[in-house]
Structure formats: structure tokens, C-alpha cells
Image (cartoon, rainbow, N blue to C red):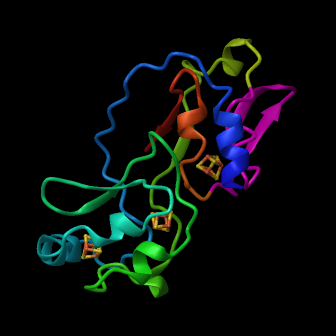
Amino acid sequence: MKERRNFLKSFTKVFKEDKKENIIVRPPYYEDKDFFYKECINCDGVCSTFCEENIIKIAQDKTPYLDFTQGGCTYCDQCAVNCPSDVLKVEYKKNIEVKIQIDMLKCLSWNDTMCFSCKDPCLENAIDFVGLFKPTIGQSCTSCGFCISYCPTNAITIK
Ligand code: SF4
Ligand code: SF4
Ligand code: SF4
């Protein structure tokens, strides 16, 4: 799967402006958000070293967050399995708690220019194109974030 995504990405050579997200997205294995602030301060960001996609970054307050600018979450469990403080636990596994949306004003397809850049990286097949245009993210979206970095106009956003 990773190879397929990397192959597709090699064809995305359109210039993209730097994108700044203010939303904090946590790894999808926690029960109580307060534990990040209580426990991670005593940890050297162990979870980030086990992330196969290298999307876990450690903030200045030493808590982990997901950065979708270069990849997405495979739900591989490794961050939870290796968390030494049980902030992240496999038994708390859930979909990432953000909503992924397509900004119709920025999206090429919504503006009559054919583009399928986000469709193929979505292994959940969650993006429907109505009559080749008007992509819409459906219920099967797991908020994995993989589609975000493939959009040439940064039209896929996190809510
Ligand atoms: S589940 Fe895997 S890919 Fe997702 S954040 Fe954790 S280590 Fe990274
Ligand atoms: S491994 Fe656990 S305790 Fe360490 S930073 Fe990650 S979530 Fe926090
Ligand atoms: S539409 Fe949802 S499931 Fe598909 S790649 Fe994007 S975030 Fe992942």
C-alpha cells in the first residue's frame, strides 16, 4: 500500500503553498486528553520514533500530534503498543477525531478542471466523484489524512 501511495505521489509535482493548521490532531488511541499533559512531559516522545509513517511530531509542550503534510495514519497500533505511560493504548483505538472536508472553492474538480489526485491514495474509497467532478468525502472516511498531501491546491481541510 505504501508503495502505491509513494508511486502516485511521485507524479504530484504541482507547486503547493505552505499550509499552516492550528488544529491539534492526536494519535487515535487515547481515552482522556488530559493524560497527554500529565504524562508526556516525562517522556522523550517514544511514540514518534515508532510511527512507520513518521507523522507523529512532538510539540513544545512535549505532547504528540499528527502532521498530515507528508503522509497519513495507517492505524498500525505501534504508537500505542510502545507508549510507556499508557497515554495511548490499543484498547482505546478509534478513528482520528477530526472531520476531513473538501473546500469547494479551492478544489479543481469543483471548478470544472478534471483532477483525481485525492481519489487513488484513498484506500477506503471514501471519495466519490459525481459525474467525474464534484468530489465528496463519504461515511467510510477514517480521517487517516493520506489524501491531504496529494491535493495540488490544498483543498482538503481538517475540521
Ligand atoms: S497508528 Fe501507526 S501510523 Fe498511525 S500515528 Fe500511530 S504509529 Fe503512526
Ligand atoms: S509515547 Fe506516550 S507518553 Fe510518550 S509522548 Fe507518546 S503519548 Fe506521550
Ligand atoms: S478521504 Fe478519508 S479515508 Fe480517504 S484518504 Fe482522505 S482522510 Fe483517508
8 w.r.t. 23: above or below: above
Q: Please state, as top left, top right, bottom left or bottom right, where the C terminus lies in the image.
A: top left
Foreground residue among 103 and 74: 74
- The rendered magenta stretch, by its main secondary structure, is classed as loop
Q: Residue at x 44, y 64 (%)?
A: 51
Residue 48 seen by the camera: yes
Residue 131 as seen in the image, left or right of residue 52: right
Q: Residue at x 14, y 53 (%)?
A: 60
Q: Residue at x 73, y 55 (%)?
A: 124
Residue 119 placement (x, y as % from top left):
73, 38
Q: Residue at x 51, y 76 (%)?
A: 77
Foreground residue among 14 and 156: 14
Q: Is residue 51 magenta?
A: no
Magenta residues (range): 116-141
Residue 75 placement (x, y as % from top left):
55, 68
Residue 10 placement (x, y as % from top left):
65, 31
Name which quarter of the figure residue 137 lies in: top right
- Report the image quarter containing ligand 2: bottom left
Name which quarter of the figure residue 113 lies in: top right
